[in-house]
Image (cartoon, helix red, strand yellow):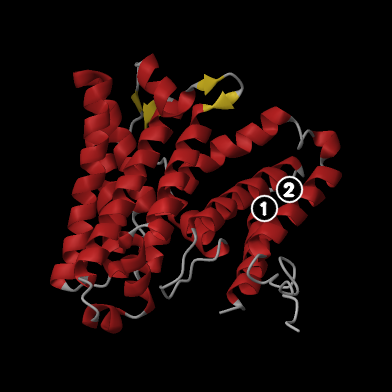
Amino acid sequence: MAKAATAPAGGFFANWRQNIIYIGFVVIFVIFAVTLNDKGFLNPNNLLNIVRQTAMIAVMAVAMTFVLSAGEIDLSVGAVAGLTTVTVAMAISVAGPLGGVLAGLATGLAVGVFNGWLTTRIGIPSFLTTLAMMGIAKGVAMWISDTAAVPILSPSYSWVFGGGSVGPIPVLMFWMALIAGIGHVALRRSGFGRKVLATGGGETAARYSGIDTASIKFKVLVLSSCAAALAGMLYAGRLQSGRFQLGEGDELSVIAAAVLGGTSLFGGKGTVIGTIVGALMIGMINNGLILMGLEFSQQLIAKGAIIILAVALSQKRR
């Protein structure tokens, strides 16, 4: 008599290390909901503000998932976002919203091609390439704007790129969902995504299997800069100005969001959905600590400790 098939034991909680980001997100949300209920944490406007503050980080983190999965890193995303806000604002003042959009995309493409070329053709490690680009992009943004904010006087641009809402839902949420959906399908359902993971998992083996690993790395670095440019366009639209300070320091939050979500710093493993949850988790922590009334120095300590604990638990499964 054949044995009846049995369901695999354990399920979600048996693999808790693999799901630590989701468990941690729920736990932190519940803690803040209970302790900060009287301070408006659960207020719909506050929850939507978390999305607004997180959207740009999430957009860049989706692309960073591809970069890290391919075994590379991009430290220039925050500075590229800041530079893009300036180029977009300046272009809108001359050529209107369409000119601003084209200028923003051109900024990201130019930086990405330069980063990719130096890394894959000249052989400079992406850590050094993008570290240098971080300084170059910030310097150019300061130079062309004379360190002053450049106003954006186009209501249509501001509405589409960050400032608008559809009913109570901010446009930024739609942008975040769109990029997350495209990124998830590209990483999990496309040949390009499989090549990215293979390149990061073992570059030599991937090369012997016929994958042009240099081309893959070039493409993910271009993708990262273009995503940073899109984030800069959203910053500019939401704040209706271009400023070189926008995006400053975002590279750390972007990388933390990807790693929190389960992407390996050593390549070969990544998940876009986890990255989005990681970005939202960082935004939620920032929001909760502010509502607690902690000083900025105390916020940094608490946020750092929470992120270290979450990353340690998630990376343990490796």
Q: Quadrant of residue 239?
A: top left
Q: Nearer the viewer, residue 8 or 51?
A: 8
- In x, y percent, where is residue 139? 27, 48
Q: Secondary structure at mark 1?
A: helix
Q: Quadrant of the N terminus?
A: bottom right
Q: Secondary structure at mark 2?
A: loop
Q: Earlier in the sequence, mark 1 or mark 2?
A: 2
Q: Residues within 10 Å of mark 2 (few under 14, many from 20)?
A: few
Mark seen at residue 75: none
User: Is 28 placed above or below 82 here?
Assistant: below
Residue at 82 percent across and 41 percent down: it is: 36
| Contact between labelled residues 2 and 1, with CB atoms less than 8 Å apart | yes
Q: Residues within 10 Å of mark 1 (few under 14, many from 20)?
A: some
Q: Which residue is mark 2?
A: 294
Q: Nearer the viewer, residue 150 or 25?
A: 25
Amino acid of disc 2:
Leu
Residue at 43 percent across and 43 percent down: it is: 179
Spot the residue most to the front. 1
User: Is 230 placed above or below 5 here?
Assistant: above
Q: Which residue is mark 1?
A: 299
Residue at 77 percent across and 56 percent down: it is: 27
- In x, y percent, where is residue 91? 22, 26
User: Is 120 placed above or below 110 here?
Assistant: below
| Left/right of residue 13 with respect to residue 113 in the rendered view | right
